[in-house]
Amino acid sequence: MVALLLAVGVALLIARAAGFARVKDVIATADPSWFAVCLVAEIVAFAAYAVVLEHAFGWRGGPTVGLRLSLHVTLASLGATRIIAAAGAGGLAVTYWSFRRAGHATDEAIVRVLGLNTLVYLVFGAAAWVAALLAALGLHGGAPLAITLPWLVLVPACVVAARSVTDARRVRRLTARQGSFLRRALGYAIAGAAWVRDVLRDRSARAPLAGAAGYWAGDALCLWAALHAVGEPLPPAVLVLAYATGYAAMILPLPLGGVGGVEAAMTYALTAVGVPLAAALVAVAVYRLFGFWIPTIPALGALAFLPRAGRALEREAGGVS
């Protein structure tokens, strides 16, 4: 309820700045036939994420849990995020619990949870970097330097830093489970990055990489369809860049997972690449309806039946020799 009030409050403030009459006109002329595309795109996104999770469960001797069970855990983690949204803590807790039920030891479960998220956001960063490069070069549309430059600089810097700390000569020392809480937390984070590096060396990594790409593509496609609904389509590179810039608000460690801030950031990012404010606001509202609010219903249902999924995970783990 608080999240809904925050989102509505932010939307009203932006609508006031855009002009309520303009926002009303955009809503009146919107093409609802694109809403079906939004719905299908989000279904594809969640199914693709389940593919990544399925691989994370089974990699190197873990149980083969199947796509259906992985999708249950995916939705349950989403439901937990709706209840405890700060920095995605609820979703991380459910995913960790699921890895433990699947037979992974405590340390391994933590590493796989962190590695899973690192892999997904690695694909996110790579897509944003390519989009920023194309936009900076004026290919497939353009965007302000204030949006393109941070992606062009920060993504390579993060990749270089990750490669450095996960080098075989350093990773064992840096991931030692000793010292203060912060030291141990850093060790787990580095171990998660090293897990990703190991996965990427494996020939079977195509499945989780494709799943991560499908997750982001499906979610961005929802925004693309929402923009078409209000008559403001964007070139692919510019769309991905605006989407990535707005979505970055979701992964900041903010209370309620950036609810309200996401709407504002995504709307600002769209206006920065040329979408009128009223149209950007309505498009983001449609995108958030299909990407955030509608999935909450099945997600909370999946969370309610999480113990059943846990028992299924334990059965699968018991069948691994």
Image (tube, rainbow, N blue to C red):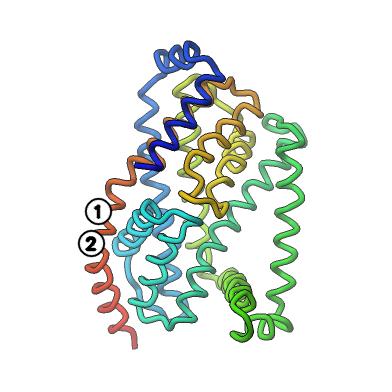
The residue sitting at 73% across, 42% down in the picture is 133
Amino acid type indicated by mark 1: Gly
Q: Which mark is residue 225?
A: none
Classed neighbour count for the residue bearing mark 2: other residues with Cα under 10 Å, few (<14), some (14–19), many (≥20): few
Where the C terminus falls, by quadrant? bottom left
Left or right, 64 with reference to 52: left
The image shows residue 143, relative to residue 187, as above or below, that is above
The residue sitting at 71% across, 30% down in the picture is 142
Classed neighbour count for the residue bearing mark 1: other residues with Cα under 10 Å, few (<14), some (14–19), many (≥20): some
The image shows residue 222, relative to residue 302, as above or below, that is above
Choose between 173 and 15: the one closer to the eye.
15
Q: Position of residue 194 (x, y in %)?
A: 62, 74
Q: Marks 1 and 2, Cα distance to the nearest angstrom?
A: 7 Å
Identify the element where label 1 is drawn. Answer: helix
Determine the residue located farthest toward the bottom in the rendered image. Answer: 321
Give the residue number, with chain letter if any, for mark 2: 305
Q: Is residue 213 visible?
A: yes
Q: Position of residue 191 (x, y in %)?
A: 59, 76
Give the residue number, with chain letter if any, for mark 1: 301
Where the N terminus falls, by quadrant? top left
The residue sitting at 62% across, 80% down in the picture is 180
The residue sitting at 63% across, 39% down in the picture is 241
The image shows residue 166, relative to residue 158, as above or below, that is below
Q: Is residue 51 visible?
A: no
Identify the element where label 2 is drawn. Answer: loop
Amino acid type indicated by mark 2: Phe
Mark 1 touching mark 2, by CB under 8 A?
A: yes
Choose between 276 and 56: the one closer to the eye.
276
Q: Position of residue 80 (x, y in %)?
A: 36, 57
